[in-house]
Image (spheres, rainbow, N blue to C red):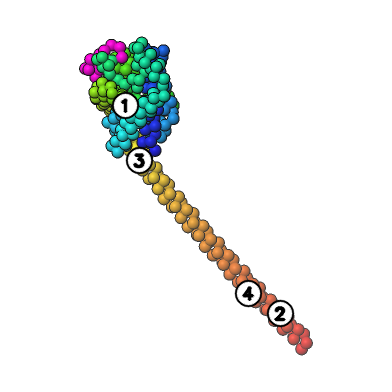
Amino acid sequence: MRKYIAEFIGTLLLTFIACGVASFTGGYQGFLGVVGIALIFGLTVTAMAYSIGNISGCHINPAVSLGIFISGKMSLIDFCGYIVAQLLGGIAAGFAMFGLSKTFNQEIIEQYGSYGYDLLSFGTNGYGEASPFLEVNMWGALIIEIILTFVFVITVIGVTSKEAYSKVAGVVIGLALTTVHLFGIPFTGTSVNPARSFGPAIVKGITGDVTALGQVWVFIAGPCIGAIIAAVTYMLLTAPKAVIAENKEILQEDRIEDRVKDEKEDNLKDVKKDIAQNEKRECIQDIKKDNTKNTVQDKDIKINGKEEIIQDIMNDLKNDVTQNKKEDTI
């Protein structure tokens, strides 16, 4: 649940801050201009990436979630949860901008409106007469959104696919979003994010201007198509490497298993050899002990035999002395 809440908050802040700046500063004709608005989008995404990236991955964009889902890095349940959270975040941001606009001085809004600045556009996207500058038609807007979303999503998938890029991923993604906005703002205002377009379009429709709401399908379909193409392209480009890496891993595992088997066999042989040597030593020691005991016993027997002989001799001598004494007495 925390990751869905993080996606809701991240999408809300991105839409509220970036679209709010694009709207309340007079659009691309205002004092920030195209470069300023593009930087606001990029910097906001970068800030969110390092804020909630460790919680949800900081998609804050249904097109990004779609690309990651197709590339196999996201479950269906999480994908659905992310989409709902992101759309709700975009809608909440739209109403937040609408509520904030009610605190503005209406005379200033009308004054700037007379100069051609729409301070209440809420950052909506459009084509034809609703196009910010070049008045690109529907097909042109669709193609531009497909291309720009392709560039953005394939960047996100690529830079988040390796752990080594994790420290710079937020910066790279922010720069990529800034780049596509620099190109796309004069054509459509740049969406590449259905949630960022959907929320402001609904609020703009509530105010009575349904143009953006009628055109919003282009800014949903275009980014989704671009995300699908980006995911498939990345998978095709990296598939051979993945297969090679997998085969190398299998070979390495087989080699490790063979090495372990060889080591086990060698260890078993060594153990058997040690056991045999120990048994041999024990047998030799037992034999030596037995020989030592036998030798001692033999010595004891010999000594005992000598003592008996000496005792017999002593007895004979005693008998001879006694016999001599008797003869002398007689």
Is tag 3's residue or tag 2's residue first in the polypeptide sequence? 3
**Residue that numbered label 2 is attached to:** 318
Going by the numbered disc 4, the residue's amino acid type is Glu
Q: Residue at x 55, y 61 (%)?
A: 292
In the rendered image, the vertical position of residue 139 relative to residue 3, given as above or below:
above
Q: Which residues are magenta?
A: 132-144
Task: For residue 178, say whether it is visible.
Answer: no
Q: Residue at x 39, y 17 (%)?
A: 107
The label nearer to you, 4 versus 1, is 1
Q: CA distance from mark 4 to mark 2?
A: 15 Å
**Residue that numbered label 4 is attached to:** 308
**Residue that numbered label 1 is attached to:** 203
Q: Position of residue 319 (x, y in %)?
A: 70, 81
Check residue 177 for magenta coloring.
no
Is tag 4's residue or tag 1's residue first in the polypeptide sequence? 1
**Residue that numbered label 3 is attached to:** 257
Check residue 138 for magenta coloring.
yes
Asked whether the residues under the numbered discs 1 and 3 touch, taking CB atoms below 8 Å apart as contact, a structural biologist would say no
In the rendered image, the vertical position of residue 183 relative to residue 56, given as above or below:
above
Going by the numbered disc 3, the residue's amino acid type is Glu
